[in-house]
Amino acid sequence: MNKSTEVLVIGGGVTGCGVLFDLAQRGFKAILVERGALSNATSGRFHGLLHSGGRYAVKDAEAAEECIIENRILRKIMPHCVEDTGGMFVSTPWDPPEHADVFMKSCHAVGIEAEEISVAEALRREPMLNPRIRRVFLVPDGSVETWEACKSLTESAAEYGAETLTYHQVIDLLTRNGKVTGAKVKNIITGEELTLEADLVVNAAGAWGGKLGHIAGCDVTVHAGKGTMVAMNFRMVNTVINRCGPAADGDIIVPVGSVAVIGTTSVNVPDPDSYPIEDWEVKKMMDQGEMMIPDFKKFRPLRAWAGVRPLYQEAAAGADLRKVTRKYALLDHATRDGVEGFVTITGGKWTTYRQMAEHTVDLVCQKLNTQRECQTATTVLKHGESGKLFKLGQRLENLETKQWRGQLICECEIVTRPQIEAHLAENHTNIINNLRRDLRVGMGPCQGGFCTYRVAGIMHENKKLSAGQANKALGDFLQERWKGAQPILWGQHLRQFQLDEGIYMGLLGLDKLPTALSGQDTGRIAEVETEGYFEVEEAAS
Amino acid sequence: MSTDTVIDKVTHSIWNQVQYSADLCIKCNICTSHCPVTNVTDLFPGPKFVGPQAQRFRNPKDISVDASVDYCSGCGVCSMVCPHGVKVMEMNAKARYKLYQKKPIPLRNRLLGRSELLGMLGSPFAPIANFMMSVRPVRIITEKMMGIHRDAPMPAWSFETFRGWFKSVHSKSPNRKISPKRVAFYHGCSTNYYEPRVGKAAIAVLEHNGYEILLPDQVCCGLPMQSNGEFGAACKNAEKNIKSLVAYAKQGIPIVGTSTSCTLSLKSDYQHILDIDTEEARIVAANTYDICEFLLDLADAGELKTDFNPVDFTFPYHSPCQLRAHNMGLPAIDLMEMIPGVKVDHIQAECCGIAGTYGYKVEKYDIGMAVGKPLFDHIKASGSKIAVCDSETCRWQIARATGAKMIHPVELLAKAYGLQDFYFN
Amino acid sequence: MTKYDTVVIGAGTAGLTTACHLAQSGQKVLVVAKGIGALLLASGSIDVLGFHPADSLTPVKNPAEKLDDFLADRPDHPYNLVGKETLKTGIDQFLQLVNQAGLDYQGDLNRNWMLPSGMGAVHPTCLAPASMVKGDLSTGESMLIVGFNELRDFFPALIAQNINEQKLGVEAGSISLEINIPIAGAMNATPIELAHAFEQDAFRNQVIKAIAAQAKSYDRVGFPAALGIKQHATAVAHLEKQLNRPVFEISSLPPSVPGRRLYEALKAALLKAGGRLIIGSQIVEGTIENGRITQIRMETASRLKAVIANHYVLATGGIFGGGIFADAEGMVTEPIFNLPVAADTNRHHWFEKKFISPTGQPVFNFGVKANSRLQPLNGDSQPVAENLYVAGAVIAGSEWTRGRTGEGIAVATAAAITAQITSQAAKSLR
């Protein structure tokens, strides 16, 4: 099968999606390919912070300024993905007072609205904070829903004729006379191979950008910096809490959706497809949390996961990854490596995706000899038309006002049957994890204890699956939830999992269905999830 | 050392305990399956739904998005049956408070919340007031204007208040007991304005057992205001009561009450729902006793007089939700069974449906009656003309629904001691 | 202080069964529990030995025959504490207890019923309510499985297909009814609401009318386990009469209605025998003096209250029940008496990589070690206190899912402890 287009974007993280939309809006014919589901890699594995720039203000003014500008833009173009949590920078007894002294000035210098409030006022707003905090500054941090954002970007792009192909993995790049002319991709689900020809290929493959560049014959060094995060079941704070000091592990708690995320670590891993979560990382997150919130460890961790940051370096480095710039890099491989038809956009952070995309598409315009204005800063994306920012209570309100009707399938995260059925009708995989990502099914305290069975039953009915397929979908999802639970499985959450086990084994007997019927030994449907997993230690320790 | 860190004394206010306890929910739905309200109406989606589940979607910075939590009756069965320690009822109470912050509290709710005021208004005119409340057209008008259901069990005012009796009659009586063993009696609005006989029975029984009764300054416990979302007003009352009662508690004088709701407020609601997180509140709580609890403790210590006359009867007994929420068992049963000839038929019913002021409201009356139906049916089927219950509003609800005469357990004791026979206003 | 003969801590199967036996033997018994136990979440049947070895996919047909092998292969399992005879006694005593309490449970140690689960898997169980036993898959009779569109926790088509695919000799058909379940808001129908609905004549008639035609093609009709709570017998009888064929229940997601019936029956039996039950009070600590528990303290609304008894039974469940607590640092504790817990403190050893692990998760086997008298043991393998006993899932080795032995442990240890305590009590009278 052959397709041809003007620009092929490889990578369906927020940057890739942003590039696709900008391209499409500027009139380019464009296709995006992503080997998994949208936003399943780095974009879906960070802490969800919409930077105010406060984290960079003191040490990196340029990055800080970029952040605050984009922060304001994103609130306008994708309000439904942004929660206005506000942010606090707290100077604890363990933070250098000098940093606090220069903090406000540094923020104001780049246009970030920062305001100091009394500790008493901070405790009034967030009673769980450590009363030993010395100083508190307010900044316009927020939190973002990445899947909603990527969905809005690709759907908006579709309105301009762009195409998004998920579960399409790049097998090879096509080259002719030193020019990249497209890519050969494989539909992981059907096995079908496609040849996609393009005038220009944009490498937006994030932490895999180096690998992809290598296939094109370019030397691109992208470090994979693993970061582990823990989602806490209960939002014990409703404001982003940052430590007021130089960047460190576990110095931020982000209330995002129905959870509070504490992050993160920074560990160089050789392979972006393999990043197991280590004990010390989880322990560190919990210990760090205690410094901001004294009762932090009493709360229930819901899930641990890791993601890999793409850290671009022009030359190879071994030093502290935090010192490798978080700025992005836009590489024209024609000038840099003598390879035409290929550009790479890498590095950067979620908050500045739009600007990264803008510069990328500016380069595309240049290379394809057209001059088209970027309008993404002022274009409201699909689903954001109401202008209303995301609110935590949105789903509950929808239920209470009867706007949402129908059976409540995932009770924890409030997902109704009509929503699930609509999703099943639009999407073609039998993977419950996809529903989870888009609708939040199974992401609440019971981690799929009740809803997995219901969803499998609905899938069986609606999609006319065989019993075996339904059983397998069920078992696969439970396994997927199990993986993220083990690093933080203790206390009350452990009780939850014994209940879930009691339901699926004791009551439903999933473990006693014949192997052929349960589908548990036949290998998984190719799903390029590469979540960190809990490594079983060898006897040595 | 306990399983739940909820029990640990945490560093900040006790709000944390209720809020944190949502974290403990593992979604088993045991609470929902026992909720008496959700089992009779689809207007209430259940305690798990409006409790720990919705709690994760409540941002204290935003206005409340709740609606259905208003149908929670506050009976507390959910908190009681939860095997994980989730304080569901308390969570719902706070959510209801927040709900009412965004809209004006109806006059009806304010009025129902002010039981002391209602008592004061009616008591001096008791005969007329009671007559009016029994006249159908008056009740219909009250329903239309105030939203108080025409059939709701309005209790009869007593012309003679308990306090009035205590001060003008009892304290002047030569038979009044003076003793080094003393209790401070918390009568509450119901005993004071509607059922002084219950208070009189309690006094008689306590004095018979060698106690002198002191009458502290006190105001309404505030629970009706709290249940209707008026936390500010409830706190004012709470603080007055704490200030008055702590003086007795600090001297080691126990605070004893005959209303299980009032004593529960003193023991628990002040701290856990109204967030009055002070040392004084804790001292008052630790020294508050329900009358049957107090008497049974005496019996266990071998200090309760057992010179009972036999009473040969099987008494149907309803254990009120607000009594079970004391988490101390059912002292009334053991106490009553000490009387020769008494058998207690403990009715296995969750709730009578009145739930304080809940069942009085026109939009909730039917729910209340449906909730209480199994209980009413049992009493009717028993053929007994008399039944026992520790809580006043339950007594009124059951009396109205079944026609039975309702007594407080202490009245049975008073009768068995030969101190006071049953009599009804 | 009110003195009891025995105080049982925990209101699960083990706790309530022990308490009922003791109360019926004439003891003054108090059951105190923090909440209602796992009874309400499990299927309501008594699993004694479902599979051996645990990872086998072939159910045990005759538990009595397999027991010797099991006892030999699983020295760590609580059955080895009580022995085969007491297990048998426990089952008989339990059966008698519930039958007298008005529940028609059936079965014996010589056969396992092969019941269909809410996924159509085979659930081998020893004692089960008559209403579930009629669904036994080993009879080869065909079945129509009936679900309700408003009940989200039961998928009849999936159940039927899984049964058919397993080629068990049973032909299963399915139908899902578009009938309004009264009192259930559309979002929230649980089996409990359905059970209340089934207690109404009108509802049952609606159901009968909707399935009568199709039911004629099948030997029996299966419903979600929700055929009434108090009026269960009436509901079943009516359905069977009108459909003119046996009717049975299939367990699915909690809350469990058969579990609820069992709880209500045990509670009623306890109260009828003069026992007392306090739900909602947590026991926070106990005092040991001279090798005896002298009192325990329960948390009431505003203070701790002492409870005194001659004997104490700890039936607080394993990790799920809250009787065993495992923390972030790998410490595993028994929170009331601080009993030593047989556990691995290395969290990496707690779990298997697979959730659906054929041999279960090691962490759920952690528990208190006991001797053959069911007294919990200290580090020197001596009883911690002569008047303290442990029943049910709090005992080490009680991982209940894989071998399907959980309720067997409960009723067996209940019988053993009852025998111990009654003989102790008799001795002290002399």
Image: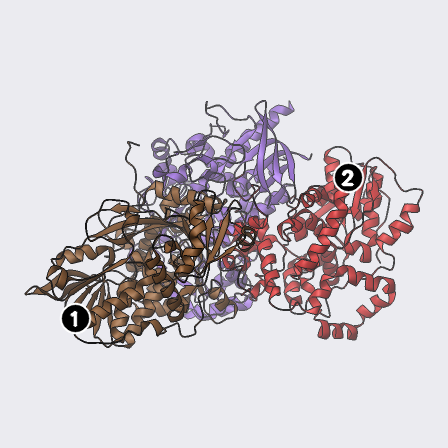
- The image position of residue C52, as x and y in percent, is 33, 40
Apparent side of residue A194 relative to residue A128 in the rendered image (left or right): left
Q: Residue furthest left?
A: A177
Apparent side of residue A303 relative to residue B197 in the rendered image (left or right): left
Q: Which residue is mark 2?
A: B253
Chain letter for the purple part: C
Label of residue C420 in the image: none
Vertical placement of residue A270 versus C88, above or below: below
For the residue pair A306 and C369, the one nearer the viewer reads as A306
User: Which chain is disc 1 placed on?
Assistant: A
For the residue pair C351 and C331, the one nearer the viewer reads as C331
Chain letter for the brown part: A
Residue type beneath disc 2:
Ile
Q: Which residue is mark 1?
A: A367
For the residue pair A513 and A478, the one nearer the viewer reads as A478
Chain letter for the red part: B
